[in-house]
Amino acid sequence: MLDWLPWVGTRLIRLATKRLPVKYRARYEEEWQAEFNALPGGKLTKLLFGLRIYAGARATGAVCQAEDNMDLAARVLSLAQQTADQAIADALRMCDETLGRARREADEVLTKARRQAMQITGDARNRAENLERDAQERHRQAMGSLVQTREELERRVDDLRAFEREYRSRLKAYAEGQLRDLEAGVTDSGRSSRWVRARSRRCRPALAPSGA
């Protein structure tokens, strides 16, 4: 009379599995059925087991759903972590690339500035050297001109001194000659005077009557 109780218990287990998420049904049905078959006692015990399984199926499904949600949350968290890690890696890579590019550009600017500074310094040094050479050349030319002018002036001074000596010598000789001529003229003039006075004394008596 109670032979139908195990069948009802099995039926309750199947109905209970339908309250579970699909992916858990086969596993739980197999576990519950195995436990159902291994129950000691009579047919009423199996019916009570089926009722207990059926009554707790919703709670078991909720637990399974919670596990699914936890798994989903874990997967979402893992995906979010992977996304965050990837974003961080991309940001770090972009930062490194930007920093490297900025460093290269800074190095290029610094190298260009140094090259321009060296070029400007070289040009300034070359101009300074050219100016120094020009100044030295002009100084050399000026000194050469001054030396040449000095030598010319010294030659003129020497010529003037020689002319002065010659002029003095000629002037002295001329003066001495004039002095000798003058002395000679004075001597001759004295003799002529005495002769004239003597002639006058001899001729004076004869001239006296006519003077009267």
Image: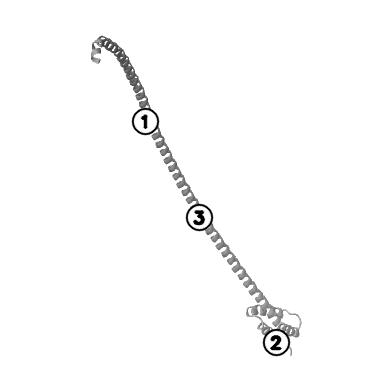
Taking the spot 24% from the left edge, 13% from the top edge, the residue there is: 209
Indicate the secondary structure of the residue bearing disc 1.
helix
Verify CB contact (< 8 Å) between mark 3 and mark 2. no
Residue 155 position (above or below residue 86): above
Circle number at residue 8: 2
Q: Which residue is mark 3?
A: 109
Q: Which residue is mark 1?
A: 152
Amino acid on which the number 1 mark rests in the picture: Glu
Calculate the distance from the C-alpha at mark 2 to the C-alpha at mark 1. Answer: 152 Å
Calculate the distance from the C-alpha at mark 3 to the C-alpha at mark 1. Answer: 63 Å
Taking the spot 40% from the left edge, 37% from the top edge, the residue there is: 142
Dot 2 crowding, Cα within 10 Å, few <14, some 14–19, many 20+: some
Quarter of the rendering containing residue 127: top left
> Which comes sooner in the sequence, label 3 or label 1?
3
> Which comes sooner in the sequence, label 3 or label 2?
2
Residue at the outermost bottom position: 1
> Which comes sooner in the sequence, label 2 or label 1?
2
Dot 1 crowding, Cα within 10 Å, few <14, some 14–19, many 20+: few
Taking the spot 58% from the left edge, 67% from the top edge, the residue there is: 87
Amino acid on which the number 2 mark rests in the picture: Val
